[in-house]
Image (cartoon, grey):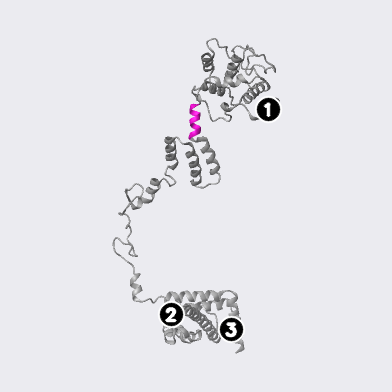
């Protein structure tokens, strides 16, 4: 106590001191009361004597200090040395590697290259429908993200094995193995439909002058000439020019058979969009693509279609088929006919 | 004397208003816990409770049993320090 700090007088001092003591006493009493309330509450709530457990429980949860064991007494790498037998491949796998192994083994995990294996399997089996179904399953299994489903679907359809196969064959000259998967099946067309098709193309050809050539892009002119020679003989006329004018309404029909054969051949105008100057003989407007627009006599058409080699007719009819034929033009031709 | 009483009341009021009372209270509690006073007293409480019976203990019982002992158990250093602080406060703010 520093008495020199007190500027107070004697009698006041005692009073003051008494006052100070009073204040101090009050503070101490407050502290005691606080403790009492705390203890009383603990007693009534039942947690006052929690720190006094019996010896048995104390022993149970004692801190363990042995080597190879943690403080609870549990062994750390208990499962490290154990091996499990895989139900799939019957191998003994270490326990810590078991789950990832199962993932790969059963082909169900995220990184198990399930798609690749399935594609291999489907390629081996050459089964289309299989791959279609599995594609859908695979999409559902992928980690979910909002836009990925749509994107994934598009990607899948673009890279499906079926599509890639047809693309592979595209550039080969195989008149007998044309693309069967096109929209219209030319073999199934009746004579009326064939006629409408032919007129379709001719009118199409007439209307759209910008449409350079109607020859299919999958075959070269040499191929066409070769086939023409093969079928028509060495005296086969050359292919007409690509941008010949629209076919006149009425036609002479000099020789039905020859014309029909030519008719079948006709993808006449050269299809080579890059080939602007078609130097092939520009003759034969009459012999141009589809000489017969409105045939009264439909017999030869069907006969010639079916009479010749089936493979040839198929190839011819498919050759005629232009990928650029559109549905609207066809329907318009039907209107014309009607 | 009423004058003293008045003075006391005034000083108390001042203590509270300035927040000094709270500060002193916290200081005292911290010091008591630090010195082990609280644990001592708690042990004494346990004895009282066991004596009276767990179910029938009341606050009044505890208070009457515990407070005198508590007062007595306060360490001297703590007591001195607190008295010092109170005196200082009075010296600063008391209008004598």
Looking at the rendered structure, the secondary structure element under dot 2 is helix
| Magenta span dominant secondary structure | helix
Please give the residue where the numbered disc 1 appears in the rendered image. Answer: A334
* Along the viewing direction, whichever of A320 and A21 lies nearer the viewer: A320
Is residue A55 found left or right of A335 in the rendered image? left
Where's the C terminus of chain A, which quadrant?
Answer: top right
Q: Tell me where residue A72 appears, x and y as whole percent.
A: 35, 65
> Are the residues at dot 2 and dot 1 in contact (C-beta closer than 8 Å)?
no
Total numbered labels: 3
Label 3, label 1: how far apart the Cα atoms are: 117 Å
* Along the viewing direction, whichever of B45 and B58 lies nearer the viewer: B58
Rendered residue at 42%/38% (across/down)? A121
Residue furthest to the top in view is A235
Label 3, label 2: how far apart the Cα atoms are: 33 Å
Q: Earlier in the sequence, mark 3 or mark 2?
A: 3
- What subunit carries mark 1? A
Q: Residues in magenta?
A: A161-169
Q: Nearer the viewer, mark 3 or mark 2?
A: 2
Rendered residue at 39%/45% (across/down)? A104
Crowdedness near tag 3: few (<14), some (14–19) or many (≥20) residues, C-alpha within 10 Å: some
Rendered residue at 51%/38% (across/down)? A156
* Along the viewing direction, whichever of B63 and A92 lies nearer the viewer: A92
Crowdedness near tag 1: few (<14), some (14–19) or many (≥20) residues, C-alpha within 10 Å: some
């Amino acid at each position: 106590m520093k008495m020199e700090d007190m500027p107070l007088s004697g009698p006041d001092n005692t009073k003051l001191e008494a006052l100070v003591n009073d204040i101090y006493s009050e503070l101490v009493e407050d502290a005691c009361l606080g403790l009492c309330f705390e203890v009383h509450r603990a007693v009534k709530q039942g947690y006052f004597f929690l720190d006094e457990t019996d010896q048995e429980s104390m022993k149970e949860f004692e801190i363990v200090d042995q080597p190879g064991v943690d403080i609870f007494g549990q062994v750390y790498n208990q499962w490290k040395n154990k091996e499990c037998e895989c139900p799939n491949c019957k191998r003994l796998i270490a326990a810590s590697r078991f789950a990832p192994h199962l993932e790969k083994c059963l082909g169900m995990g995220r990184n198990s290259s399930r798609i690749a294996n399935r594609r291999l399997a489907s390629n081996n089996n050459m089964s289309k429908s299989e791959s279609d179904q599995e594609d859908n399953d695979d999409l559902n299994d992928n980690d979910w993200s909002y836009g990925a489903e749509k994107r994934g679907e598009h990607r899948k359809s673009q890279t499906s094995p079926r599509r890639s196969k047809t693309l592979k064959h595209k550039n080969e000259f195989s008149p007998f193995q044309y693309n069967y998967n096109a929209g219209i099946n030319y073999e199934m067309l009746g004579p009326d439909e064939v006629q409408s098709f032919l007129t379709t193309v001719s009118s199409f050809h007439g209307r759209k002058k910008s449409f350079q050539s109607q020859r299919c892009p999958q075959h070269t002119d040499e191929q066409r000439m070769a086939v023409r020679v093969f079928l028509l003989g060495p005296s086969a006329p050359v292919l007409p020019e690509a941008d010949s004018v629209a076919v006149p309404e009425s036609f002479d029909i000099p020789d039905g058979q020859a014309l029909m054969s030519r008719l079948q051949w006709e993808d006449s105008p050269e299809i080579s969009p890059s080939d602007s100057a078609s130097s092939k003989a520009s003759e034969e407007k009459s012999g141009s693509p589809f000489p017969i627009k409105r045939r009264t006599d439909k017999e030869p058409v069907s006969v010639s279609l079916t009479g010749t080699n089936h493979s040839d007719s198929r190839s011819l009819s498919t050759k005629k088929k232009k990928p650029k034929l559109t549905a609207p033009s066809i329907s318009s031709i039907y209107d014309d006919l009607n | 004397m009423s004058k003293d009483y008045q003075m006391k009341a005034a000083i108390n009021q001042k203590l509270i208003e300035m927040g000094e009372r709270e500060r002193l209270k916290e200081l005292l509690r911290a010091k008591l816990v630090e010195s082990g006073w609280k644990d001592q007293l708690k042990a004494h409480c346990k004895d009282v409770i066991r004596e009276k019976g767990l179910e029938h203990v009341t606050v009044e019982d505890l208070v009457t049993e515990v407070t005198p002992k508590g007062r007595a158990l306060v360490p001297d250093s703590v007591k001195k320090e607190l008295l010092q602080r109170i005196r200082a406060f009075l010296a600063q703010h008391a209008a004598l």
